[in-house]
Image: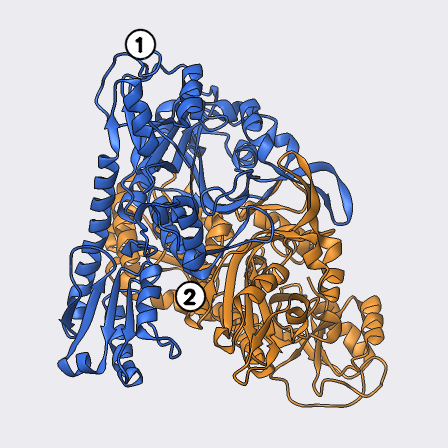
Chain colours: A orange, B blue
């Protein structure tokens, strides 16, 4: 496999295929998500879905095919998405009267339904979520990060006023921050997008940004406050308590299968994937070893059962045509957090040899009867280790810069925290020269003003902005 | 609402909308699945997904857009699906070189991937499942039963030989039988389709058929043995233990959102939905009553919490602008199995009034402290009652017939069990005259031969066939 240091992009493309996460689909830019990759998505999905429901949202399902005219009702929205649309022109053996677009996102069709369902302040807030596939035609596809079709959840909510809608926008961002940090072990930075990086049709866009191991930024989830833009375009109105007709304030927010790519690029190394236990399809793999591998199988199965009872996802590698050495490498490449080796001598001693995928712990024998009691702690420690390591990496590769040379240097390998004037033309110049774009204005950054790092005009936003090359 | 007896179809269409299960989508034949309907799908999905995984299958995800040429590789398959395809001809602002079809089912794209993934007998069986949306352009759409877009799971498996593939085909049918019978309380009849009713491209098709309350049959799940048809079309081959190259035998099987329609049409009555507890979004609704409804709210919330602890899905109707009487009707219409009324006098007596949606139990006061202990039993009884009632209805409306007049009479209101010659032209005549089609040759029917009920030629199949008008 190509080492990360030699060609990060080649390393990534080879690894996601070799580890069995994906395969190429027959249509350019599409991917097949194989069981090992899909299981990670299911684990993330279950946790995120639980949080979405706990916070009062309900799941629903809206049609995938949307009349082309709907997209055009919100001017900025159609301008942003028109170049990426896939269009159904024929169906049932005939040319359609009106072409249908495959949803690139569902604000329009959901907006249309909200206008039917909402009439009174009693119908608000309306808190909906959908798990679905969407299609955006990508010129430069990249597995998981930018694929022509991807899977996601999209939350869509309507509220009686700006305050309530903004609270919702931030609540969704908090859910994403929680999922990214505590499940995927991504130390993301939550912040607001600059106007040039906003979602097409949004009044404000918030994001969580993660740093990949090549120093680039990846947008891992976004939450949008739409103001009344979509409410006006789709006539989403309610009668207030005083009987006045008012426009709703709406939000939308999404997290996608790109999270799997983020996990690969944040934790992986030259041996392969490194999976955070909370998203690992197999948290523990048991590999029988020694000449009498068949003899230890019953004990391996018994050990697996006892670990499962302890709530652990465990897999016994019972393949008979492969050597233990091959299997060790294979499971390292596939990123399994903990490997247990079990041979006849181990068994006689009442132990298994425990090897962690990463970290300072050496391989060590552990008494079989202690394993069920200690395994959850081992996995929690591993999860915490990954987050700590990624946080240290992010901080070591983020520079606070006040002059242009330092800025250019910082964004060539990582992130720059800089003051910026907020002028779109200045953003464009920075991008043309360094490929870096403003990723976000971090929510928790201290207040600070001064001169723009590029053009020396007075800074905007009242804070430093994170700039980086991005996926 | 239109009574069932007056116009079953109008009753159904009014009810699914009024109960908040669905709304019409903007494109003809599409539906929006609203939260109350989607929750039923999620409950079914969780149970079915668990069974699919327990039996060794893994979930994956395949692209929705399929090159048109793929469909054409299996001659019967394309013939069956061509009239129903939606076709993407433009994407990314350009006309595509090859049109892409929106998947109507995924045998072709999965077949293409299987041919890449399978090379040795060690790769078999390959047991995959996908949860996805599919599009089939419907000329006569009907909510849930036949919609242009619907949700489903599709299992796709590859095996080393016919025996193994047939075991898989029957295992999937058993899963569907279990889910239909034990979750949806549909007393379905598992059986084999006659050749004229097979899936396009299948060697054998199996089905579970349920009887709706208008006497029609509904196909509630199908499982197909493909023989080597798709393996030959997509070159899915493996090297056997003796080194010979062989074609795989494949299967596919699917269950869809039409199950929600089946539940409505099997259990509903003129008051509205009747939901089996295992698929009911709310199994119990608590309605505060009396002039001091606000005063009993804390007790209602406390009762709800104690029922939740007992594992029950419970909802407190805290709407203040609606009368208790309105709420009783509303929850009856929405099919909630058990309603608990809680007023100040009940509270003073330490009781709540329990009303079941159906059955012989009168409304009765029940001590609050006994409710958590008894509620699961009440719900289980209700679930069993629905299955028993539907089974009695099915049996009362199924006639074993040996002459044409009895046949025509039986299929005008229910099902006919009849001997049939198996000749397609005779099937066609029967359909033209009565609108009835062969629904299945039941697996568990006794062996029996004789004369065809229609043409008096010798019977085929060695058993009676179920004929009915179908959805």
Disc number for residue A50: 2
In front of the other: B319 or B42: B319
Determine the residue positioned at 45% across, 43% down: B145
In front of the other: A75 or A276: A75
What is the quadrant of residue B354 in the picture?
A: bottom left
In screen coordinates, is B98 left or right of B467?
Answer: right
Q: Is residue A115 visible?
A: yes
Spot occupied by residue B281 in the image (x, y as percentages of width and height):
35, 60
Q: Which residue is mark 1?
A: B458
Secondary structure type for disc 1: loop
Quadrant holding the C terminus of chain B? top left
In screen coordinates, is A280 left or right of B404?
Answer: right
Spot occupied by residue B58 in the image (x, y as percentages of width and height):
42, 45
What is the quadrant of residue B272 in the picture?
A: bottom left
Q: Chain of mark 2?
A: A
Disc number for residue A299: none
Determine the residue positioned at 56% across, 72% down: A158
């Amino acid at each position: 496999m190509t080492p990360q240091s030699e060609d990060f992009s080649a390393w990534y493309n080879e690894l996601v295929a070799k580890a069995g996460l994906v395969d190429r689909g027959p249509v350019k830019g599409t991917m097949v998500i194989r069981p090992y990759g899909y299981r990670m998505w299911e684990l993330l999905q279950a946790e995120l879905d639980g949080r979405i429901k706990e916070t009062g949202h309900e799941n629903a399902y809206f049609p995938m095919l949307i009349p082309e005219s709907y997209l055009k009702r919100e001017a900025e929205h159609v301008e942003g998405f028109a170049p990426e649309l896939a269009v159904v022109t024929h169906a049932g053996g005939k040319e359609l009267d009106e072409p249908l677009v495959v949803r690139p996102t569902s604000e329009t069709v959901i907006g249309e339904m909200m206008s039917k369902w909402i009439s009174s302040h009693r119908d608000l807030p309306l808190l909906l979520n959908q798990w679905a596939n969407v299609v955006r035609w990508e010129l430069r596809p990249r597995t998981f990060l930018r694929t022509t079709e991807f899977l996601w959840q999209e939350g869509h909510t309507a509220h009686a006023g700006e305050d309530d809608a903004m609270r919702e926008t931030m609540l969704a961002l908090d859910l994403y921050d929680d999922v990214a940090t505590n499940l995927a072990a991504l130390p993301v930075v939550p912040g607001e997008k600059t106007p040039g990086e906003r979602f097409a049709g949004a009044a404000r866009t918030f994001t969580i940004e993660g740093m990949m191991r090549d120093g680039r930024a990846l947008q891992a989830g976004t939450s949008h406050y739409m103001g009344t833009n979509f409410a006006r375009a789709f006539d989403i109105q309610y009668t207030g308590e005083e009987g006045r007709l008012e426009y709703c304030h709406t939000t939308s927010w999404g997290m996608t299968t790109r999270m799997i790519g983020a996990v690969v690029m944040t934790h992986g190394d030259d041996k392969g994937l490194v999976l955070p236990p909370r998203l690992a399809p197999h948290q523990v793999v048991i590999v029988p070893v020694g000449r009498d591998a068949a003899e230890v199988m019953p004990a391996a199965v018994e050990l697996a059962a006892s670990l499962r009872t302890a709530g652990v996802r465990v897999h016994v590698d019972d393949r008979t045509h492969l050597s233990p050495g091959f299997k060790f490498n294979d499971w390292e490449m596939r990123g399994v957090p903990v490997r247990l080796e079990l041979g006849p001598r181990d068994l006689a001693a009442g132990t298994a040899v425990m090897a962690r995928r990463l970290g300072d712990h050496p391989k060590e024998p552990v008494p079989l009867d202690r394993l069920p009691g200690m395994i959850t702690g081992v996995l929690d420690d591993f999860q915490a280790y990954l987050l700590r390591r990624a946080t240290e990496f992010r901080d070591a590769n983020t520079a606070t810069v006040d002059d242009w040379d330092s800025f250019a240097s910082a964004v060539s390998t990582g992130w720059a925290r800089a003051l910026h004037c907020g002028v779109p033309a200045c953003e464009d110049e920075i991008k043309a020269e360094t490929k870096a774009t403003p990723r976000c204005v971090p929510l928790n950054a201290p207040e600070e003003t001064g001169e723009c790092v590029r053009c020396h005009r007075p800074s905007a936003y009242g804070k430093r902005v994170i700039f980086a090359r991005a996926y």
